[in-house]
């Protein structure tokens, strides 16, 4: 089986599991007694833990093997999913987030590096990442459809059981199909770290990319509260169907990266444009109160978000060497996770006076979108020429 086929099949399994959780995550946490501030705090546990494990796991991926790291990631995701299924309070949920964070750290640098350096890859990376985004949209929609169908009978926690089962399948698939399908390793873990740090210090484009990826963390304000907000207007089943539609839009955004523009975007314009397309709709929610307008804004936001990751991955992987690729990818992810963790920590404080008040979400989004626009404009002006 060709490496690109393996990559696409793995992407489907992994994203199917995550899709099961997406529309039910925050409502499930509310069901077990968490307030808006606690929901932000429990998710902050995930991103802070990711920060702690990100670089060491990237080093392991370069030293021990990317396929091994991907398998380890999915084992952790499976354990975390099943443990979350049993969660009954803040600390139980936080411990499940911690386990899943180890999986996320193992995966973030290893998976993209595995396919970029695959000996039999013939397609350009922009096309590979664009196709993976299309598959992500389809898989997420199907996972959501299954979970929202099951929750009526089994409760919202069933989403995490589906996530755990899909992750376990992805773990077995990675063990069978990904290990060994990569170039011979030429660097130890610490040599890879030294090379990655040196590259980051010397490369203005990579420093700029790290800054713009950190700014992406602002959109955690959307991730946490879109479902609680829409539950004021729609049923859980309707939200699940809307989530499916949003991820069909994500699939469409993958084609934007497969175009000639995506293949030749050497300036990072794709990343900047994606951030603008994501930020503007967040401002609109506070000023366009109809549910029809909200749905249009959700679609526009998801299109921008969907295009960002493959544009960023393409920009990154075309500028680094294979020997320390996973470690350097982890350094870039580290920057993005700083933005996410910082956003969640701020949210857990800002939302405390407004716990369980959905109207506060609208103004949180408007402020976040305006700040993102200002920061993106500043970074674009300061981009390397």
Image (cartoon, rainbow, N blue to C red):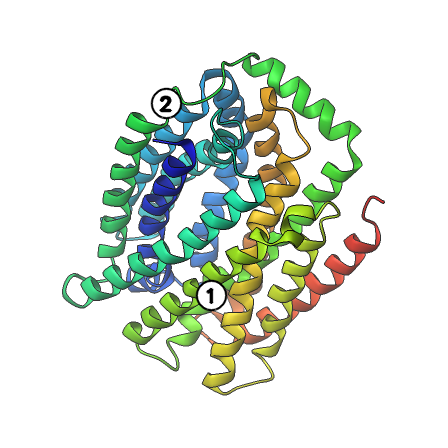
Q: Which of the image's four quarters has the C terminus? A: top right
Q: Which of the image's four quarters has the N terminus? A: top left
User: Tag 1, which secondary structure?
Assistant: helix
In the rendered image, residue 2, in percent from the top left (x then y), is placed at: 39, 32
Give the residue at mark 1: 249
**Left or right of 84 in this view: 3:** right
Q: Residue 179, which numbered label?
A: 2
Q: What residue is rendered at 31% in x and 77% in y? A: 235
In the rendered image, residue 20, in percent from the top left (x then y), is placed at: 30, 56
Q: CA distance from mark 1 to mark 2?
A: 33 Å
Q: Nearer the viewer, residue 191 or 217?
A: 191
Question: Where 130 falls versus 296 (above or below)?
Answer: above
| Outermost residue to the bottom | 290
Q: Residue 354, which numbered label?
A: none
In the rendered image, residue 310, in percent from the top left (x then y), is placed at: 56, 48
* Quarter-of-image position of residue 285: bottom right
**Left or right of 65 in this view: 280:** right
Q: Residues within 10 Å of mark 2 (few under 14, many from 20)?
A: some
**Can residue 375 be seen from the camera position used here?**
yes
Q: What residue is rendered at 46% in x and 65% in y? A: 249
């Amino acid at each position: 089986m060709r490496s690109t086929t393996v990559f696409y099949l793995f992407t489907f399994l992994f994203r199917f599991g995550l899709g099961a959780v997406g529309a039910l995550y925050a409502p499930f946490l509310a069901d077990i007694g968490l307030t808006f501030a606690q929901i932000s705090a429990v998710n902050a546990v995930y991103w802070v833990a990711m920060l702690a494990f990100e670089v060491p796991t990237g080093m392991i991926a370069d030293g021990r093997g990317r396929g091994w790291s991907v398998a380890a990631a999915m084992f952790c995701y499976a354990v975390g999913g099943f443990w979350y299924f049993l969660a009954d309070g803040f600390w139980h949920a936080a411990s499940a987030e911690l386990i899943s964070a180890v999986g996320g750290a193992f995966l973030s640098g290893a998976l993209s590096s595995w396919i970029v350096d695959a000996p039999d890859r013939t397609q350009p990376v922009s096309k590979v990442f664009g196709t993976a985004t299309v598959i992500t949209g389809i898989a997420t929609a199907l996972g959501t459809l299954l979970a929202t169908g099951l929750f009526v009978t089994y409760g919202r926690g069933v989403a995490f059981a589906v996530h755990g089962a899909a992750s376990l399948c992805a773990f077995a698939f990675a063990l069978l199909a990904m290990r060994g399908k990569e170039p011979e390793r030429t660097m130890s873990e610490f040599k890879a770290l030294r090379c990655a740090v040196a590259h980051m210090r010397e490369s203005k484009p990579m420093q700029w990319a790290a800054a713009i990826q950190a700014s992406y963390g602002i959109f955690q304000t959307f991730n946490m509260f879109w479902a609680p907000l829409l539950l004021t207007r729609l049923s859980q089943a309707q939200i699940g169907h809307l989530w499916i539609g949003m991820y069909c839009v994500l699939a469409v955004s993958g084609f934007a990266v497969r175009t000639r523009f995506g293949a030749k975007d050497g300036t990072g314009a794709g990343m900047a444009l994606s951030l603008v397309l994501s930020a503007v709709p967040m401002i609109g929610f506070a000023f366009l109160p109809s549910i029809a307008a909200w749905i249009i804004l959700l679609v526009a936001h998801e299109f921008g978000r969907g295009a960002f990751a493959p544009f960023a991955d393409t920009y990154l992987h075309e500028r680094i060497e294979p020997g320390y690729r996973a470690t350097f990818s982890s350094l870039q992810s580290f920057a993005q996770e700083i933005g996410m963790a910082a956003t969640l920590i701020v949210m857990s404080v800002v939302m405390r006076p407004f716990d369980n008040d959905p109207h506060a979400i609208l103004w949180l989004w408007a402020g976040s979108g305006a700040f993102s626009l200002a920061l993106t404009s500043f970074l674009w002006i300061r981009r390397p020429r």
